[in-house]
């Protein structure tokens, strides 16, 4: 809420370099619309891969990690009762439900306290049922990095939260309607203020990333469907937290600096658009040659360092499972790829490329 009291003050000192990055993001958004019209099947395949990456990465940022062999089944979900091995799997499935609520919505709901608590209820719907309530006790943001407990930030009290949170959503809505600043800057300020308020007892970080996805989709920056923003945050987790904490200093006084966090978010988004275009061009170029050649080229030149059967299938829609299996077997026989774990087999097995030997 503090970031929206005086938007001129908040955004008046925008770093020069950020303007170029925002322009890059807007160019990427325009090209993304063309790709959606021209290559819908390819983007559908990218979206499914990204869904898995986003659920996994956002959970992992908070230490919610599940066995690799269980991820696909947990992401798939489906009706009926599920058997979970531990609390991590329950919370993982909860993030899946909350993300799907946003991704599958025909019309995204406006931000409000009831909607936020609905997402929070989904987050913990498979765990202890403790979601769906604002915090009742004072919470603190602490670090144990230096071997002792250090309070990094003290959020508002539960009593203050009850009026700060709805005011934040209303001020954000009005700022968007007034086009008071670039949409991505407003999203950055929204997420920063939300994290500063820290409105729930547990799950604030995951809610903040869900809010980020929701707000980006609502503003038509839909690259998060095709490239995992959460995965990029996880890969730069230290910078992610450093940027948040740098921007939270003096937040209570309204003297904070939004640019460490907002600049980080813009950089992540710009890099995601760069990655998106690279993936689209690379996979579009795979369309030539026989189906077996397409599978070989994808595995050797475009697959992740550690990939599975489903990754190949998602990247190459229309190519049959037997063809993919045949190429995997051929490449393994040639010594080009190997199983990451010899104990695993079948479609859940993880593969990796072997280092290419070059002659001196």
Image: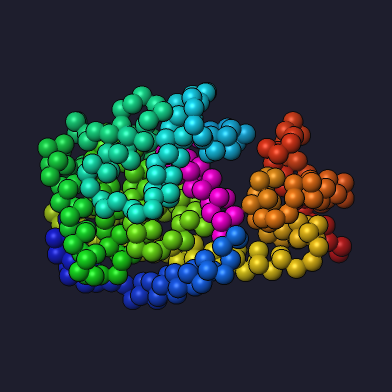
Coordinates of residue 17 in the picture (x, y in percent): 37, 74
Residue drawn at (34%, 59%) of the image: 218
Quadrant into which the N terminus falls: bottom left
In the image, is 288 to the left or to the right of 233? right
Instruction: Say which residue appears at 54% left-offset and 45% top-offset.
Output: 52
Image location (x, y in percent) of residue 353: 75, 51
| Residue 4, magenta (yes or no) | no
Q: Position of residue 43 (x, y in %)?
A: 56, 60
Please state the total of marks drawn on the protein image. Answer: 0
* Front residue of 61 and 333: 333
Is residue 141 in sight in this rendering? no
Magenta highlight range:
43-65
Residue at 33%, 53% in the rendered image: 108
Residue 349 appears in which quarter of the rendering?
A: top right
Q: Is residue 29 visible?
A: yes
| In this rendering, position of residue 205 left or right of residue 66 | left
Type of colouring: rainbow
Q: Is residue 121 above or below residue 177?
A: above
Depicted 290 relative to depicted 166: above or below: below
Residue drawn 26% across the image and 58% down it = 189
Residue in the foreground of this view, choosing between 354 and 26: 26
Q: Closest to the observer: 248 or 326?
A: 326
Q: Is residue 127 left or right of residue 57?
A: left
Magenta region, main secondary structure: helix
């Amino acid at each position: 809420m503090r970031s929206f009291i005086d938007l001129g003050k908040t955004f008046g000192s925008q770093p020069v370099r950020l303007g170029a990055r925002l322009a890059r993001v807007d160019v990427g958004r325009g090209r993304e619309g063309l790709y959606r019209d021209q290559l819908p099947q390819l983007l559908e395949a990218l979206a499914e891969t990204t869904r898995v990456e986003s659920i996994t990465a956002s959970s992992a940022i908070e230490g919610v990690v599940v066995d690799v062999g269980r991820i696909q089944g947990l992401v798939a979900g489906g009706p009926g009762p599920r058997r979970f091995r531990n609390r991590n799997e329950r919370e993982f499935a909860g993030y899946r439900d909350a993300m799907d609520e946003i991704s599958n919505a025909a019309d995204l709901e406006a931000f409000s306290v009831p909607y936020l608590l609905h997402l929070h209820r989904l987050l913990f719907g498979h765990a202890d049922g403790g979601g769906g309530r604002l915090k009742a006790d004072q919470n603190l943001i602490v670090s144990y990095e230096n071997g002792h407990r250090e309070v990094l930030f003290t959020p508002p009290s539960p009593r203050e939260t009850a009026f700060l949170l709805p005011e934040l959503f209303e001020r954000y809505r009005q700022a968007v309607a007034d086009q008071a600043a670039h949409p991505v800057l407003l999203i950055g300020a929204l997420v920063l203020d939300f994290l500063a308020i820290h409105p729930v007892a547990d799950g604030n970080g995951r809610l903040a990333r869900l809010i980020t996805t929701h707000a980006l989709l609502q503003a038509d920056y839909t690259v998060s469907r095709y490239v995992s923003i959460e995965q990029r945050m996880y890969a730069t987790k230290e910078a992610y937290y450093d940027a948040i904490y740098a921007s939270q200093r003096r937040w209570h006084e309204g003297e904070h600096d939004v640019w460490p966090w907002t600049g980080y978010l813009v950089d992540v988004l710009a890099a995601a658009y760069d990655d998106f275009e690279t993936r689209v061009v690379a996979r579009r170029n795979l369309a030539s040659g026989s189906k077996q050649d397409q599978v070989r080229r994808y595995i050797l030149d475009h697959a992740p360092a550690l990939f599975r059967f489903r990754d190949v299938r998602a990247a190459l829609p229309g190519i049959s499972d037997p063809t993919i299996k045949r190429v995997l077997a051929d490449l393994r026989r040639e010594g080009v790829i190997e199983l990451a774990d010899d104990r695993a087999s079948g479609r859940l097995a993880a593969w990796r490329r072997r280092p290419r030997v070059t002659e001196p």
